[in-house]
Amino acid sequence: MIQTPTTLNVADNTGVKKLKCIKVLGGSRRRYATLGDIIVCSVTDIIPTCSIEKGKVVKAVIVRVKKEVTKKELPILLVVTTMFSLSIISHYVGRTPDSFILSRSDGVLFIFFFLLFIFYIVSVVKSKQGFFEYSKPQFNIMTSILLIVGCTFGIILASDLVVDNAKVLAEALNVSTKFITMTVVVIGTSLPEMTMTVVASKKGEFDIALGNIIGTNIFNIGIVLGLPLLIYGGFSSVSFTLIDILAVQLAASILYFFSKNDKVLSRKEGIIMILLFCLYYGYMLIF
């Protein structure tokens, strides 16, 4: 996102190297600029032979936006997903019917990688102090604690209801619990992420859209899966196969390579990902 006081690299032959955004044109309520927008800037760095002085106020056009998500966060997602896939595949080698496909040691590994990701995010935020705008909290500390505790109990209760009713629904429809989990439960829990991604894309905030997907998936592997493994010691399953794990790995790999190619996700690539999603769910329904 380009806003006050974002530092920008200059792509012309004036001798100016860097600018600092001091205003986004296009209305008093405009806060962010993207490709093609005109902004007002202050010159902060020049070459020795430049005729423009430091501190001079100029107007600039945004011609290229650097996508940090495709450069750093997407490779992290690919690494975490690959680690998850290899952990399960390693347990399938010489596996007996009653053995775990994931163990407590896997849970420790997942949580460790999640903590590394959090450390990376914190370091990024600290390096950009002054870039973010801070507002007065809506609630005081005590109210916030009570809301957190209350919402936590609500989530626990709702989770129990979802698990119990997923089993009942599977029995009533005479389908596997896996199918209900991968449809009703997954769609229900993914709706908030899908809504945020659509809204962010509509506003042109594609880093937020991708960051939402990346953060959610890393959190799911690191904490949603890692914490129960750490507590209960391991999971065993006869429903999920290597095909399911390969589908997860393929999805992360395709997202990475599509984004890495030209730092842009096109409509054509989106259609390909939707078709692969339908293909996998069709396979799951048939087999």
Image (tube, rainbow, N blue to C red):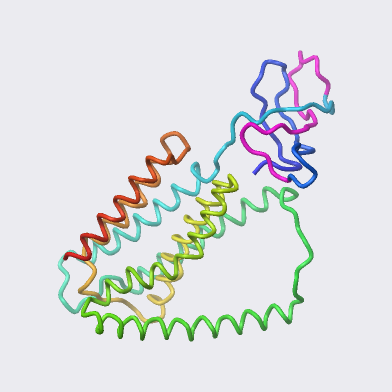
Question: With 11 as the anchor, is 191 left or right in this view?
Answer: left
- In the rendered image, residue 9, in percent from the top left (x then y), is placed at 66, 30
Quarter location, residue 181: bottom left
Residue range in magenta is 31-53
- In the rendered image, residue 159, in percent from the top left (x then y), is placed at 44, 81
Q: Nearer the viewer, residue 183 or 59?
A: 183
Question: Quick check: 10 above or below 119?
Answer: above
Question: With 2 as the anchor, is 135 left or right in this view?
Answer: right
- In the rendered image, residue 4, in percent from the top left (x then y), is placed at 76, 42
Question: Quick check: 165 above or below 116?
Answer: below
Check if residue 185 falls in the magenta segment. no
- In the rendered image, residue 253, in percent from the top left (x then y), is placed at 35, 48
Quarter location, residue 148: bottom right
- Taking the spot 38% from the left edge, 73% from the top edge, the residue there is 185
- Taking the spot 29% from the left edge, 51% from the top edge, the residue there is 276
Q: How many marks?
A: 0
Question: With 287 as the anchor, is 112 left or right in this view?
Answer: right
Dominant secondary structure, magenta: loop
In the picture, which quadrant includes the C terminus?
bottom left
Question: Quick check: 104 above or below 246?
Answer: below
Question: With 23 as the anchor, is 211 left or right in this view?
Answer: left
Question: Quick check: 105 above or below 11?
Answer: below
Q: Nearer the viewer, residue 237 or 36?
A: 36
Q: Nearer the viewer, residue 47 or 187?
A: 187
In the picture, which quadrant includes the N terminus?
top right
- Taking the spot 52% from the left edge, 54% from the top edge, the residue there is 198
